Structure formats: C-alpha cells, structure tokens
C-alpha cells in the first residue's frame, strides 16, 4: 500500500477542454492540451492521493494510477464531478467552454444561399463556483485556474472571490509566452494571504509544487 502525505485523501482533478456540439461534426471548444491538469493529477498520485481525473477530449493521455472519467461537454463534466464527491480537495484545471449551443442540430448544418446560420448560445454551469459554494459536501480545499492575457494578479484575485474557491493558480497565456500548449508555465498563486509569483518552470515542476502545497494545506 502507498504511503505519502496524501494517502487516504480523495482529490478530484478536472482537465482538458470541453467540446460543445453544434451539429454532429462541429463543436465549440477552448484550446487546452490537458498538460497541466495531467501533470497535477500525476503529482498528487505520487504523494499518495486517491485521484478522480475528470477529463475532456485532451491531447495528452491521462496519467497512470488515477480513476479516469472521460467526458465531452461541460454538462457531462459537471455530472462526473458531482458523482465523484465527496473529496477533500478539488483542482479545476479544465478549460470549460462558457457556452453551449441551445439545441445542437441532429444533422450537419448546410450552407444556404440566403444568409448565415444563427447559433443560439446558452451559458454552461460554472462547475468551480458550484463546488466552491458553502455546504456539507464542499471540499476543504478548492483550487481554480485563471488563464489571463493581461493584468493577471488583479483579475485572478477578483476571480478567487467571485468563484468562492480557496486558491487560484493564475497564468499569463498572452501571445509570445509559449505557455499555451507548451511545456513551461509561469504562475501566480492567489490565496487568502495574497499573491505569490512562482518562477517560470516546467509544468511538471508547477504540478509538484502545487501538490506539495495542497498536501500541507490538508495536513
Ligand atoms: O471563469 P473562467 O473560465 O476564467 O474560470 C476558470 C476556472 O473556472 C478554471 O478553474 C475552470 O476549470 C473553472 N470553470 C469551471 N466551469 C466553467 C468554467 C470555468 O469549472 N463552466
């Protein structure tokens, strides 16, 4: 049996993008490789955690040693997260699409001569905010992510309060950083105590450091 500081702790990790169908062949999605979420899940397993890994259609394969729940859409991701509760901690690294098409077409949409098709969008549930809401099921530690292209610390600090989560791992994904889809990340950890800038390092190193911090918080 495995030891480690997170032995006996259940942690839910979401990762990857969601795909929201428009019709059988088209979808709305965010760019996300699933690399950071996968690295975090792997680091948590290394510390002995029991990890439920809820993943959208990512390009990176899920890590060894987790319970994998594969989903496509935000609604499915929400169902899988809620079904996996309770957990001592939850890390929301997924890039969830903000909207879905109200009624996805059963047939492929066709080009028409008379104008463009209209897409009726509805808002997806905010899984991070829902799990962060106070209640008997709330994990002790809820961690969200914030990918911003400017004003990272200010926007992420606001996001932490708006979502009700304990920590936000914020990163700058603006053009030229090479972070999106790359192997490195430069993050700012936002907690109730303030903002901590971490040096640029590999996504695996960010994951190790975050898992370590999470283990300390749950100790
Ligand atoms: O609001 P925004 O999408 O920037 O928030 C990002 C954070 O919220 C990430 O941790 C993401 O996984 C989570 N999120 C979520 N459900 C959504 C949208 C975002 O869990 N519908």
Image (cartoon, grey):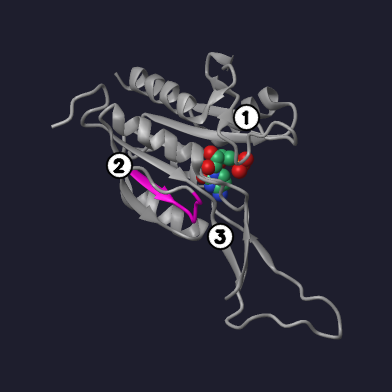
Q: Which residue is mark 2?
A: 86
Question: Residue 104's spot in the image, x, y percent?
Answer: 60, 74
Q: Residue at x 62, y 25 (%)?
A: 157
Q: Earlier in the sequence, mark 2 or mark 3?
A: 3
Query: Which residues are drawn in magenta?
Result: 52-59
Q: Is residue 35 visible?
A: yes
Disc 3 crowd rating (10 Å Cα; few below 14, some 14-19, many 20+) is: many
Cα separation, mark 2 vs mark 3, equals 26 Å
Disc 1 crowd rating (10 Å Cα; few below 14, some 14-19, many 20+) is: many
Q: Residue at x 37, y 19 (%)?
A: 217
- From the viewer's side, name the closer residue of 192 and 136: 192
Q: Which residue is mark 3?
A: 19
Q: Residue furthest left?
A: 1
Quadrant (top left/top right/bottom left/bottom right) for the N terminus: top left
Q: Residue at x 44, y 32 (%)?
A: 142
Quadrant (top left/top right/bottom left/bottom right) for the C terminus: top left
Callout 2: helix, strand or loop? Answer: loop
Callout 3: helix, strand or loop? Answer: strand
Task: Give the image quadrant in which the ligand numbered 1 is located.
Answer: top right
Disc 2 crowd rating (10 Å Cα; few below 14, some 14-19, many 20+) is: some
Is 9 on the left-hand or right-hand side of 69? left
Cα separation, mark 2 vs mark 1, equals 28 Å
Q: Earlier in the sequence, mark 1 or mark 3?
A: 3
Q: Which residue is mark 1?
A: 171
């Amino acid at each position: 049996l495995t030891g480690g500081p997170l032995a006996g702790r259940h942690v839910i990790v979401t990762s990857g993008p969601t795909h929201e169908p428009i019709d059988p062949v088209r979808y709305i999605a965010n760019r996300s490789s699933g690399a950071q979420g996968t690295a975090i899940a792997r680091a948590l397993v290394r510390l002995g955690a029991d990890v439920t890994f809820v993943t959208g259609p990512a390009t990176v394969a899920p890590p060894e040693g987790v319970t994998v729940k594969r989903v496509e859409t935000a609604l499915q991701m929400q169902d899988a997260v809620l079904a996996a509760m309770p957990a001592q901690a939850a890390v929301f690294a997924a890039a969830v699409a903000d909207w879905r098409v109200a009624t996805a077409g059963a047939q492929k949409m066709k080009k028409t001569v008379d104008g463009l098709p209209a897409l009726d969008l509805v808002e997806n549930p905010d899984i991070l905010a829902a799990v962060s809401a106070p209640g008997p099921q709330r994990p002790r530690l809820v961690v969200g992510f914030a990918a911003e292209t400017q004003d990272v610390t200010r926007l992420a600090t606001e996001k932490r309060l708006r979502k009700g989560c304990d920590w936000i791992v914020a990163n700058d994904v603006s053009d030229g950083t090479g972070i999106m889809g790359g192997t490195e990340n430069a993050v700012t950890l936002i907690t109730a105590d303030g903002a901590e800038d971490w040096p640029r390092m590999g996504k695996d190193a960010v994951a190790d450091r975050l898992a370590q911090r999470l283990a300390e918080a749950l100790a």
